Each structure stands twice: as C-alpha cells, then as structure tokens.
Amino acid sequence: MRTLHQWGLCLVILGFLGCGEDAPSSDDTTTQVCTPGESQACVCTNGNNGAQVCDDIGSRFESCICEDGNNDPNNDDNNDENNDDNNDPNNNPNNDPNNQPNNDPNNDPNNDPGDPVCEPSCGPDETCVDGQCVEDDDLPPVECPSANFLDVTAFEGPGEGYPDPELEVTCTEDTMIVESNGIIHYEFVPITPGDLRVRENRWEVPLRPQLAQERTDIALLGTVAFAINGIPIFGPNEGPPFGDPVYNTIVDWCLGHIGPSGYHLHAVLEECLGGEVGAQGPSPILGYALDGFPIYGSRGCVDEDCQEVIEFKSSWEQTGDPSTNAWDNNQCNRPECQQAAGEYLDQCNGRVGPDGTYRYHATTTFPYILGCYSGEIEVDDGGDDNNNMNPPDLQACQGESDCVGACDAGALGCTCHQVPMGDRFCHPTCNNDDDCAGQGMGLTCIAEGVCAPGRP
C-alpha cells in the first residue's frame, strides 16, 4: 500500500496523471459539502429575507426558510427543475432568459451571470443577496466556518527541530480572521533553497463575500489565498523568470516549497489537507481566497441532492512552454472562461454551485487554484505580499561581469544570483531590507544577501 508521501510524489512527478491502477478507491459519499447546522443568507421570492440551513449530514443546504417560517420552494436553487443548473444538457445555470442577469449581450462579460451582482452597488450598510441589496441588520447570522479548518495540533508536524504548527480561526459578525505561524502540519521536505521558519500570518476575509462587477487579477507575487492548515497560497508562477513551479517540478509532495517569504503552496493536494486517497465523493473546502469565497477540491456536486459528482477542469489551455513566463504560455479562450458550464470552470477557476453560491475549485492543471478574483477585493499597490506587484526588471547573466551596471542606480551592489529554477539574474545586493528600497516593488533582502521578490 502506498503511503501519503508516495502518493503525493507520484502525483507531482506524473503531472497529476495518476499513480497506477492499484490506487485505492472508495465511494466517499459522506464527505461534507457544508457543516451540519450552518446557515447562509437567502432572499425569498416575495422579497423577504430568509436563511438556508445545512442538513444533518452536511450533504447540502435545505430550501430557503422565509421570515414567515415557511419553506420557499420557488427560491430553492435546484427545487425547480427548470432552474436546475444541471437540468439543461448544456449545463447553463441560467438557461431561463428571464433569470439571466446578463442576458443583455451588451453587459460586461466579466460579470458572473450565475450569481447576480447588484446594480447599482449596495450602500455601506447593505449586502447584495441574489441581486438585491439587503440591510445588514436584516441579514440572518452566518456561522463562523472554523470547523472547516484542520486541527493542526493533531498532526506530527514538519519534523524534529522545527516549531509546531499554530492556527487560530475566529469571527466577528461579518469577518473571518485566520492567524497562523506558517508552519506546515506534515513532513518538511526541502526542495528549494531556504529553511522552514515561523512567519506570522493574519488574514481577514468577509463572511458574506460579494461577486464583483468585474474580475480582478490576482497578485503576480505573494499571497492570493490561504489553505485550511493556515499556509499561504500563491499564484501559479514563481519569481523571475516567472515560470510555473508545478510544471517545473520544484514543489514538494504537497505542492509547496520555501520562497523568500517562507513556505507557501502553489497548488493543493486534497490528501495533504485531510482528504482520503482515492475519494470519490464531493471534495471538502481546502482554503479561502482573499475575496472570501471558498476553495473546494476538484470534485463537486452537479445537483442539489448530490446524486452526481464530477471532477471539474480548468478552462485554461497551455499554449507554450510555461517553464518561464507561465501566464504568457497559458490562455483562457474557451467559452466557459466567461461562464462555467459542465465540467469546465470559469476564468477564475470557479463556478456557481447547486446551492446558488459561488466557489472556486482546485484543479490539476494551470492555474491550479485561482486564475483571478471573482469577488470584491481591494487591491493595494503598496508592495505587501498580499497585493499585486509588478515584476522587477532583472537582467539575465552568466557571470559577475554581466552584472556591471545592470542594477538600478542606488543599489548597494549587483551580483549574478541563481534563482530556484536554475536561471541566473543580476540582483541588487543588500544587508537589510532598507538596501532594497527603490530596487523594485516587492523586493526584500533574503538570506543570500540579495534583493528578491517576497518578504522574509
């Protein structure tokens, strides 16, 4: 029988194509898609507010319970067979033109038509629910999703000589707060230069995430999401020359590695986050994007009763060699990029589930987790690793002579430095972060004494 470690290595080496016919399998029909008793806001067809409650086994959300105490069958996302997002053979979740918020071809194609946004935007004390602005005071309470996270203290941790992992999840009325020390709960296997060390992480995301009018690019470098073990998730590229680290096989068996900012993931393996090898049921939540929407594994229900489970695929297609400049060598041109349909996800790697809520899915191909943000999110250009950062203009080199005068004016020095993928670039030298100021957005002084993307 293969161990978890062997399974993870097998998946990485073979590019997620599988590890042989003797892979264990199980009919995992008990995997929860929600926490029993968990509630979420909904709006009844009569305009009143209501709530949907997760059933006793965590398999689905029940019909909307309206303020008058009655079930609203017309507001049950999949109770009406004409509104079942999988009843249509083309799997168009908005087959009814009268229920299509973007039926007008002149509307912005980046609006997700499966889960309507509010136009005009809601006020500061309102929340958009099913296309209607609802006063925040009238919204039913949302249960804190702390149960979706791992108890990292129950695992053996990274190994002897390393700190124990720490993770805490708390909630206010409208915000989930996740804090961790950046230490993984599984064995640490060095793949790239650097060592595992404590990194204080804190993320705040909305409990009621809202779809945006337009999609937003994720950060080129830095955190775009976090996993249920409290580990940062980065996008599908490394620092210069911005290649795909999964394609280049420079990630460990759980698809992460050490970078200038510490340990982070570029993709997720469900088995590393509490899932079972060979599971066949719907995937659990594996993380949350910074816009607040959950990230599920690759499998999901196509109907409310979860009678059919499929594995979702990215709509992005490889068009070149992503060993460098991953984004330039993958394109999202399928029709599903605008609106998820069937097994294919939208450009951001997400879809609207049978309960009517939006979610992302992890996939085995680029972009692996997020292709963009579908939800409302504030993006600051200030250089924090949670924000979009422009790539520093670093010159390729073979030796020190190539770097004479190659770094920006004001650099302490300039040296030919090898990045984890083996390429060499002229990097400014440094003794501390102050020496990297003005040398490029997002550059900090790493242990090797050069300015590089990330945060120590």
Image: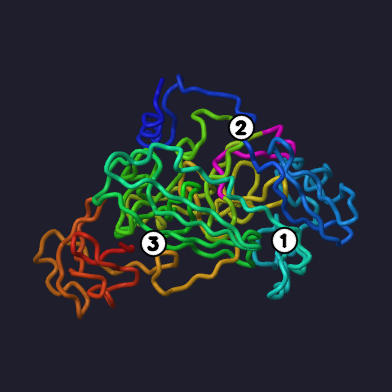
Q: Residues within 10 Å of mark 1 (few under 14, many from 20)?
A: many
Query: Does 110 lie within the magenta span?
Result: no
Query: Which residue lies at the image location 67% right of the left edge and 50% below the top edge?
Result: 352
For label 2, the SS is loop
Dominant secondary structure, magenta: loop
On the rendered image, what quadrant is the C terminus found in? bottom left
Q: Residue furthest left?
A: 401
The answer to whether mark 1 and mark 2 are in CB contact below 8 A is no
Query: Which residue lies at the image location 87% right of the left edge and 48% below the top edge?
Result: 71
On the rendered image, what quadrant is the N terminus found in? top left
Q: Which residue is mark 1?
A: 116
- The amino acid type, in three-letter code, at marker 1 is Pro
Task: Say which of 262 and 178 sits in front.
Answer: 178
- The amino acid type, in three-letter code, at marker 2 is Gly
Q: Which residue is mark 2?
A: 281
Q: Residues within 10 Å of mark 2 (few under 14, many from 20)?
A: many
Q: Residues within 10 Å of mark 3 (few under 14, many from 20)?
A: many
Query: Which residue lies at the image location 49% right of the left edge and 29% below the top edge?
Result: 277
Query: Which of disc 2 and disc 1 is earlier in sequence?
Result: 1
The residues colored magenta run: 295-308
Q: Position of residue 174 (x, y in %)?
A: 64, 63
Q: Which residue is mark 3?
A: 221
Q: Position of residue 239 (x, y in %)?
A: 32, 59
* For residue 114, above or below residue 174: above
For label 3, the SS is loop
Query: Does 304 lie within the magenta span?
Result: yes
Q: Quadrant of residue 423?
A: bottom left
* For residue 177, above or below residue 55: below
Query: Which of disc 3 and disc 2 is earlier in sequence?
Result: 3
Q: Quadrant of residue 86?
A: top right
